[in-house]
Amino acid sequence: MEKYEELLLALRKVIRATDLYSKQLNKLTGLTAPQLLILREVAAAPDGITASAVAQNITLSPATVSNVIDRLEQRQLIHRERSTEDRRRVVLSLTARGAERLQAAPRPLQEDFIHKFQALADWEQSQLVSSMQRIAAMMDAERLDAADVLEVGSYAQQQFKQNS
């Protein structure tokens, strides 16, 4: 097997693991990974948080976050409320139903990864980061939105819609 074939196989395995996690998450909770990520971010701000702050914290575009927030609000998992201090500011908060869903959600896929990654020597961590950044560049992927939670399904659907 050629080296590039080994690399592509490893990438497909990562994508597959991400896809399986996404399906498990959706089956267990009815949530997608971006929805879970946004719920966690809103829950972490007991005094409320704005959609733009959520987008910045999870490194997704404001438009993507806004669409996900719309769906979460329709499902009564989060609540939008206009600030009494600044009427231009809309604050997000978790509903009781949202808190229940969050409680039932499995741990994020990357938690085990983070523990294993941090156990590596600094030079090895740097080498892996550099290699993945180079792979992203070789795949022309630097401009794509990326969240801290690994999730493939919505990205694949997004790409399909853009190419249709």
Image (cartoon, rainbow, N blue to C red):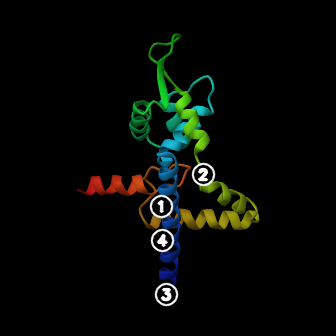
145 shown above or below 97:
below
Q: Nearer the viewer, mark 4 or mark 1?
A: 1
Residue 152 at what x, y percent from top left? 45, 57
Q: Depth check: 95 or 35 in front? A: 95
The span from disc 2 to disc 4 (Cα, nearest Å) is 20 Å
The alpha-carbon separation of the residues under discs 4 and 3 comes to 15 Å
Is residue 155 shown left or right of residue 160? right
Label 4, on which residue? Answer: 12
Spatial CA span between label 2 and label 1: 13 Å
For the residue labelled by badge 3, is the local secondary structure a helix, a strand or a loop? loop
Q: Quadrant of residue 120?
A: bottom right
Q: Which mark is residue 2?
A: 3
Which residue is more in the foreground, 164 or 131?
Answer: 164
**CB atoms of marks 2 and 3 within 8 Å:** no
Mark 4 neighbour density, 10 Å: few (under 14) some (14–19) many (20 or more): few
Give the mark nearest the N terminus, 1 or 3.
Answer: 3
As measured in the structure, the alpha-carbon distance from the residue carrying label 2 to the one carrying label 3 is 33 Å
Q: Name the residue at 70% across, 68% down.
A: 124
In the rendered structure, which disc, 2 or 1, sits on the residue that comes first in sequence? 1
**Horizontal and vertical percent for residue 32?**
47, 48
Secondary element under disc 2, as helix, strand or loop, is: loop
Residue, x 34% and y 54% (percent of image)?
A: 157
Q: Is residue 116 above or below residue 27?
A: below
Residue at (50% x, 13% y) in the render = 86
**Residue 118 as seen in the image, left or right of residue 129:** right
Q: Amino acid at mark 3?
A: Glu
Which residue is identified by label 1? Answer: 19
The residue under label 1 is which amino acid type? Asp
Given contact means CB atoms under 8 Å apart, are the residues at marks 1 and 3 in contact?
A: no
Mark found first going from the N terminus, 2 or 4:
4
